[in-house]
Amino acid sequence: MQKYKVVDGHKKIGGERKAPGDIVDVSAEVAKQLRLEPVKEEEKKKKEKE
């Protein structure tokens, strides 16, 4: 699955509440339904370091 970023408001994904800026692993179909934004490579690396 690809990583996506929550951009507009809080979303409930996998039983957890995610805030804007959180990065989640979901399918492209779910990302489209929730209006999530694909994560760029720099953001992936930054998040992995945390």
Image (cartoon, rainbow, N blue to C red):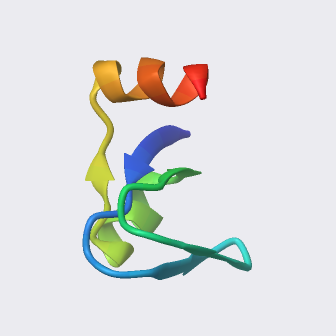
Is 39 situated above or below 9? above
Residue at image location 58% in from the left, 19% down from the top: 49
Where residue 24 sits: x, y (%)? Answer: 54, 52
Residue 48, how many percent across, how many down? 58, 24
Q: Quadrant of residue 43?
A: top left
Residue furthest to the right: 15
Residue 28 spot, x, y in % from top left: 40, 53
In this rendering, the count of numbered labels is 0
- Please say if 39 is above or below 31: above
Residue under the image location 46 percent in, 67 percent down: 30
Screen quadrant of the C terminus:
top right
Location of residue 7 (image quadrant): bottom left
Closer to us: 48 or 35: 48
Q: Residue at x 27, y 70 (%)?
A: 35
Work out whether 50 lies above or below 38.
above
Observer-nearest of 29 and 10:
10
Q: Is residue 13 above or below residue 39?
A: below
Q: Is residue 39 left or right of residue 46?
A: left
Q: Quadrant of the N terminus?
A: top right
Left/right of residue 5 with respect to residue 26 in the rendered view: left
* Quadrant of the rendered image containing residue 34: bottom left
Q: Residue at x 44, y 23 (%)?
A: 46
Residue 13 lies left or right of residue 19; in this view the side is: right
Rendering coords of residue 39 (x, y %): 32, 38
